[in-house]
Structures are given as C-alpha cells and as structure tokens.
C-alpha cells in the first residue's frame, strides 16, 4: 500500500503539481502518545509555610509520554491527603508544556500537609509541605473585651518568652 503526498509549487509561468509516492509499512506507523510519567516540580516539593496561609509556590506537575514529550489537554486531579487546608482547584488540564498547578493553603494545625496529584490512568505524584505555628514572640497583641452594657475595654500586651 502506498500513500500519495502532493506538493504544489508556483512558478512564474504556471502552477505545477507534483505527486510523490511513498511506500508504507507497519514499521512506519506512529504509536499514539501514552502518558507514562507524572512528575512533581522540584520547586513545588517540600515547602515550608505558616499554618492557614498559602504556600509560596503552587504545587506543579509535568505530564510526559513514552518519548518524554509534554502532554497537553490531560486532566490532573488534586486531593488533600493529610493536614487539612484547602486547594484553589481540584481539577486542572495540562497546558502546552504538560504542566498543571494548584495552590495549597496549609491547614490550621502545625505539622505535615500532604497532597496527591493524579491522572485518570493511575499516574500520581505526592507533595509534602510543613505548616509551622505562628511565632508571636515580640509581637504586640491587643485584647478587646465587651462588657454587658456594650462598653468595651482593651489592653495591649507584648508577647515575651518565659
């Protein structure tokens, strides 16, 4: 079986068409792209932040096929595994670079937060971030109390160590 490729060339005198016949064989067929690797960007991994605040960088993955080429248009699902918090999106389609990102706001308790990004075919990448408690040492805190007759009383304190 042969494929016919048509090439057109314009000359000053006329428009010429040339046909070239190229033999086809099973070896010349191209296999469809298959997603084989979902990788977490290094800048997204092992971030440290403050409880209840967004991380400095989004959680970004890159999806590639069997040839190492970026795969665009594939849906990536993000889900919190531990530590609480919230994601700005839970489903993202990869861009032309094969990348998808979600922003994590850490949970309200200090400790480890974990998020998994995955494809519908079972590929996954896990992100771990550490949420640190708010350090109030040296901070000035104002405490306002309301008394029964709608009068407010306030006091200002400076947090010091023991």
Image (tube, helix red, strand yellow):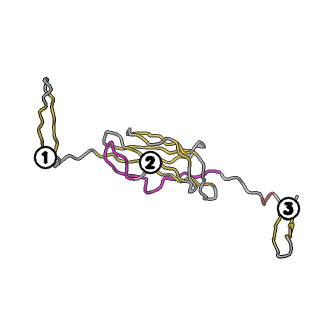
Looking at the image, is mark 3 or mark 2 earlier in the sequence? 3
Q: Residues within 10 Å of mark 3 (few under 14, many from 20)?
A: few
Q: Tell me residue 38's x, y (percent).
A: 54, 51
Q: Which residue is mark 3?
A: 4
Can you identify the residue that label 1 sits on? 160
Up/down of 68 relative to 137, above or below = below
* Secondary element at tag 2: strand
Q: Position of residue 94 (x, y in %)?
A: 56, 50
Q: Nearer the viewer, mark 1 or mark 2?
A: 1
Which residue is drawn at the image coordinates 48% and 49% (left, top)? 101
Identify the image quadrant of the N terminus. Answer: bottom right
Q: Is residue 105 left or right of residue 17?
A: left
Q: Secondary structure at mark 1?
A: loop
The residue positioned farthest toward the bottom in the image shown: 12
Distance (Cα) linking label 1 and label 3: 83 Å
Instruction: Determine the residue positioned at 44% across, 39% down.
Output: 81
Choose the circle earlier in sequence order: 1 or 2: 2
Q: Nearer the viewer, mark 1 or mark 3?
A: 3
Part of the protein shown in magenta: 34-56
Number of numbered discs: 3
- Residue drawn where x is 81% and y is 67% of the image: 7
Residue 5 colored magenta?
A: no
Q: Badge 2 is on which residue? A: 127
- Return the residue nearer the eye: 83 or 141: 141
Q: CA distance from mark 1 to mark 2?
A: 35 Å
Place residue 43 in its image quadrant: bottom left
Position of 61 with respect to 84 (left or right) is right
Q: Where's the C terminus, which quadrant? A: top left
Task: For marks 3 and 2, give the one nearer the viewer.
Answer: 3
Q: Count neighbours of disc 1 (C-alpha within 10 A) and say few if under 14, some if 14 to 19, many if 20 or more.
A: few
Proximity of marks 1 and 2: CB atoms separated by less than 8 Å:
no
Query: Where residue 63 sits in the image (x, y, percent)?
Result: 56, 52
């Amino acid at each position: 079986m042969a494929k016919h490729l048509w090439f057109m060339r314009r000359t000053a005198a006329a428009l010429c068409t040339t046909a070239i016949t190229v033999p086809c064989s099973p070896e010349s067929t191209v296999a469809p792209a298959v997603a084989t690797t979902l990788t977490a960007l290094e800048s997204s991994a092992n971030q440290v932040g403050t409880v209840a605040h967004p991380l400095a960088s989004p959680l970004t993955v890159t999806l590639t096929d069997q040839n190492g080429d970026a795969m665009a248009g594939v849906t990536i699902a993000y889900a919190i595994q531990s530590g609480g918090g919230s994601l700005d999106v839970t489903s993202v389609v990869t861009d032309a670079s094969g990348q998808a990102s979600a922003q994590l706001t850490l949970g309200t308790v200090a400790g480890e937060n974990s998020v998994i990004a995955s494809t519908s075919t079972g590929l996954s990448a896990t992100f771990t971030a550490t949420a640190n408690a708010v350090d109030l040492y040296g901070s000035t805190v104002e405490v306002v109390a309301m008394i029964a007759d709608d009068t407010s009383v306030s006091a200002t304190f400076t947090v010091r160590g023991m």
